[in-house]
Image (spheres, coloured by chain):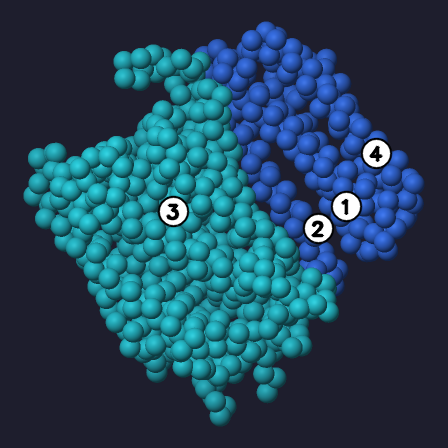
Chain colours: A cyan, B blue
Amino acid sequence: MAHDEHAHGGHELSFMERYVFSVDHKVIGLQYLITSFIFLLVGFALMGLMRWQLAFPGTPIPFFGGLFPSDLAPNGVMSGEFYNSLGAMHGTIMVFLGVVPLAVGAYGNYVLPLQIGAPDMAFPRMNMMSYWTYLPGGILMLASFLMPGGAAQSGWTSYPPLSIINPGQTVWLLSMVILITSSLLGAINFLVTTINMRAPGMSLWRLPVFVWAQFVTSVLLLLAFPPLEAASVLQLMDRVFHTSFYLPKDLVILGQAYAGSGGGQPLLWQHLFWFLAHPEVYVLVLPPMGIVAEIIANNTRKPLHGYKTMVFSMIAIGLMSFMVWAHHMFISGMSASLSNFFLVTTMIISVPSVALMTCLVFSLKGGSIRFNVPMLFALAFIPLFAIGGLTGLPLGLTVTDIYLHDTYYVIGHFHFVVVSGSIIALMGGTYYWFPKWYGRKMNDTLGRIHFWGTTTTMVGIFLPMLFMGLGGASRRLYDPTAQLHNLPVQGWNVVATYSAYLLALFQIPFIYNFFNSMWNGEKTPENPWQATTLEWACPSPPPHGNFEKTPTVYRGPYEYSVPGRKTDFWMQTDKN
Amino acid sequence: MNNPDTHSGVTNAKLGVWLFLASEIMLFATLFTSYIVLRMASTSWPWGWDVLNVPLATLNTVILISSSVTIVMAYAKAYDKDKAGFQKWMAATILLSLGFLVVKAFEYGAEFKLGIGPHTSVFYAIYFTMTGLHGIHILGGIAVNAGLLYMSSVDEHWANPLFLGRVEGAGLYWHFVDIVWIFLFPALYLL
């Protein structure tokens, strides 16, 4: 393959070429991994500040309160504007700078080319550009805290007219446009790589589930992100050139008539935003499901139950995810027949989702399960994600949604899906593929401490949110005690806050384990988990170009415990 | 990187351009959808021919359609490895696209002189946003085409099988930009 043209060209790669502006998908994958984990930590820290205000409103933030300028936190007590900024930035950073780049940019980049037997991505330089667009976009997003007026304050959903009036939003929009560009570059690259660069014999029905998940995800990113890009351009026009795409006629702000022409539609933004943001939920969920499928097949030592069902379910989810967006807007104002339509599509999309989960559960049946650290995370994913998924159904039904809309229940539901679902799976993926990245294993004891601490504290945060929401507590309130009806459930806010701080504590063994194992971890052979897929058929870490010679694929991805074989795994590259 | 011996039989570059165009279609489709939603809800939407310069826009339509022809000619010449012919037709394409921008600049200029801008009404907001974004796409196309014209002066590139693929990719993109205008012209000026 002609990928060799940019490396091995008879000269040693300099440090910059090798680690900073690398075109190697493995280096770029690890750049994405480290960067997005850092962004996850930053987003988590913002939430830690907010949780103090929610549990103990009006009291100074301990330790850090004095560090903030007095307009953000006078006397160490968080101001309402600062609280709003933290909320908007927490959501934005976690979704667009944390989980998606980790799931797609990091794992997809590193693992997908290996699993299909390709020497690199289809467009290595574009791959590098994708990372180097993502990082400045992310830094710009963070830097918005330093702008006059502070960071965006209108939630990660940025509903107008508030988002057009509030300060800080312009930088948010600019960095979103940059991040969307990065994501589009990545999506094109993943699709072309999967379609064109598969090794001989790697037919579509021999692709690991993880590759299918990345493929469907890339289609979603490719087709769902441009509408948000267009919507962001319109909002940018509203803010910078004083158009009125999202502003109605005769708008009055703080007693002042708005100077713009008016005549626009605030609801238009909501439609365009959710047209991206619902497929985005499946972008957050499908790659982690792929990771869980890989780990479960490997550690039950048997083929996945219903491989084709899983693939068809993912394709069905991908198609349906474009037809459910307005279930986020049942009470924003739409006709009853339209809300019925979105109610029905939402119920339909839950069918393939449940099929996927059922396949994962049935895969466990009759297996001789190895309870190693990656498997613990994969096993925890199933019930925790299931809670997240099932709590979503009442939000998709119009009648129950009227009560639950904009309560803490929504936050609880979403975080069960994305945190104790996606992030748990992504952490499991780190333990699973670490031997591939560094040729060493992460420490087992520290891994188990991290696992038990993380899963229990996560439930400690999000279960109280479901209770608070059922009790009627609204989300996005600066001071939850300001409304009498919130007082009976205020105790749960304290539980959630302390759980969140414990969750932070339990990440220390993970961070230490990660960096310590890079140099001091137990050395591992090429295929430490005795897995069947192609990424384990090359050295760890793989050299530039991955495979010594292009591998040939002879069988499906999960041929474990085939009767009559000496070993209990049959690699895709093994002819006999 | 652009080995034609791929699973799909289509080169990576060509597949990449098609996927990029798919995302571009979603981008402009969103804008057209917004246009429809805003217009349907509006109580005072002007007729395009009353407030915009239809003759100039018609001229621009002719210019863009001609440039679609010239870029196909450029590709045909590149296919025949006819360097001089390629350069002639590609230069014609670039000149036509610059001509489009000049005409557009006259239109914008006349509107600004009257104090009309994107802030004037939702109609002008969507008019300036869509034609502006389309103009940026034209600029991008000019940059790509000029790059190819420059590359064609180096004989080394003619020996590279990737060169023809790049010309084809640029042509696909240019046709897309033209087609967007074919929709923009009636939507904004004639309907």
- The image position of residue A462, as x and y in percent, is 22, 53
Query: Of label 1 and label 2, which has the lower sequence position?
Result: 2
Q: Where B105 sits versus B167, above or below?
A: above
Residue at x 17%, y 55% (from the top left corner): A498
User: Could you tell me how far apart the alpha carbons at marks 1 and 4 are, in whole angstroms?
Assistant: 16 Å
Q: What residue type is labelled 3?
A: Ile
Dot 1 lies on which element? helix
Instruction: Please tell me which residue is depicted at 59% across the width and 87% down the height of the picture.
Output: A576
Q: Distance between the residues labelled 2 and 4?
A: 23 Å
The picture places residue B4, in percent across and down from the top left corner, at 75, 60
Label 4: element kind? helix
**Location of residue A449 with respect to B116 vertically, above or below:** below
What's the residue type where badge 4 is placed?
Ala
Q: In which quarter of the image is the N terminus of chain B?
A: bottom right
Q: Mark 4 points at which residue?
A: B91
Mark 1 and mark 3: Cα distance apart in space: 39 Å
Left or right, A388 with reference to A144: left
The mark closer to the camera, 1 or 4, is 4
Q: Name the residue under label 2.
A: B14
Q: Which of A337 and A33 is in front in this view?
A: A33
Task: Measure the C-alpha gap from mark 1 to mark 2.
Answer: 8 Å
Say which amino acid is labelled 2. Answer: Lys
Q: Please tell me whether mark 3 sits on a helix, a strand or a loop.
A: helix
Residue at 39% x, 18% y is: A248
Q: In the rendering, which numbered label is found on residue B168? A: 1
